[in-house]
Amino acid sequence: MSLAHTAAEYMLSDALLPDRRGSHLKGLRLELPLDQMVKFVAVGFPLLLMSLAFAQEFSSGSPMSCFSPSNFSVRQAAYVDSSCWDSLVHHEQDEAGQYKTKSLWPHKALPYSLMGLAVAMYLPVLLWQYAAVPALSSDLLFIISELDKSYNRSIRLVQHMLKIRQKSSDPHVFWDELEKARKERYFEFPLLERYLACKQRSHSLVATYLLKNSLLLLFTSATYLYLGHFHLGIFFQEEFNCSIKTGMLRDETHVPHLITCRMTSLSVFQIVSLSSAAIYTLLVPVIIYNLTRLCRWDKRLLSIYEMLPAFDLLSRKMLGCPINDLNVILLFLRANISELISFSWLSVLCVLKDTTTQKHNIDTVVDFMTLLAGLEPSKPKHLTQREHDEHP
């Protein structure tokens, strides 16, 4: 065996990927990075604000204080504070002298409304986890495994071709068999390509993804409506008039009908309202961007894997409307690019291929590795010329 053949065998052996049989890819990402960021912010931020509201209530005591008359006993003053907090109704006179009431209940419901917002924002996450993740996980495991196996099959094929070339005494026989194999498409492994083509006709994953992001936009719009309708009207109201002619003070003639109370937690209420509106306003463009990514193909990823035999979705123009399950799978393949060991090798080969296309006709990784192993990717010219001379 010549030194060149030995070096070629070592190079091909090093190019083989390690066997991951039995590996379940525990680090598989089943959420896109931007989706994960949206989840953490949309769910975690209201929980953080809820903690702030509860902490303020526990540290400062009652979120409001009433200015009770000086002749009130301690028990009566405590009753006034409790009664006004329970009712949270502002009384004011209009021009006709009639009393109008305005409820201030959003102050009382603030922590619980934040909890409800967090639960609502988590519902799309649960939808994705239970409706899409099981199928997506099995798809990604199969496709990642097959992509790496297809790469390894190509390298082993070149190793086999090198051994046959060494054993073949007549180079004409070897090149004739090689051209016949290419013509009959023996080098192609179409299982993965056909599976991906079938995914173009499936829409369960993309429908779940669209529904998930649409629900996020819907709940965000509901948050805006809630803040605008209930918070905006009382946003700057620090004091309110409370009616205390109830309960134990109903029959007291020396007790005024209305007393003034002050919301000591108004600053927390304002911070929560403004920050919620600002954060969810920033999330809307991110959610819309996630949806727009379904309107275009990740052709760079596909073009790199075009180096594999029978993986020519691009060159055959088999890609149609991008809103299907295949596009969702490609997005998650890009997110799990670290699990695709063959991607780095094929990326390097694609770069080298672009520098050698002027001299050699290289289409697949088999052609390129054949060239690196010291074999011509096609029949040498001197053999072709000899055939013409023998059979003019």
Image (tube, rainbow, N blue to C red):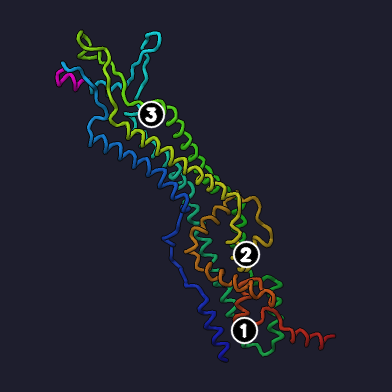
Which quadrant: the C terminus?
bottom right
Picture residue at 65% right of the left edge, 60% below the top: 314
Q: Amino acid at mark 1?
A: Gly
Picture residue at 52% right of the left edge, 59% below the top: 334
Residue 57 x %, y %: 26, 34
Of the numbered discs in the image, which one, if any, rests on residue 374? 1
* Residues in magenta, as a range: 72-79
Can residue 77 be found in the magenta stretch? yes
Q: Which residue is mark 2?
A: 311
Q: Is residue 232 above or below residue 59?
A: above
Q: Is residue 154 above or below residue 42?
A: below
Asked if residue 111 can be seen in this view, the reply is: no
Of the numbered discs 3 and 1, the one sitting upstream in the chain is 3
Can residue 108 be found in the magenta stretch? no
Does residue 265 appear left or right of residue 30 in this picture? left
Picture residue at 37% right of the left edge, 28% below the top: 236
Q: Which residue is mark 3?
A: 235
Question: Are circles 3 and 1 on residues that touch, CB within 8 Å?
Answer: no
Of the numbered discs 1 and 2, the one sitting upstream in the chain is 2
Q: Quadrant of residue 123?
A: top left
Q: Amino acid at mark 2?
A: Phe
Q: Is residue 391 above or below residue 127?
A: below
Does residue 194 appear left or right of residue 28 in this picture? right
Depth check: give the residue in front, 185 or 72: 72
Dominant SS in magenta: helix
Depth check: give the residue in front, 37 or 197: 37
Residue 280 x %, y %: 45, 40
Q: Amino acid at mark 3?
A: Phe
Residue 355 x %, y %: 64, 74
Question: Are circles 2 and 3 on residues that touch, CB within 8 Å?
Answer: no
Q: Is residue 90 above or below residue 268?
A: above
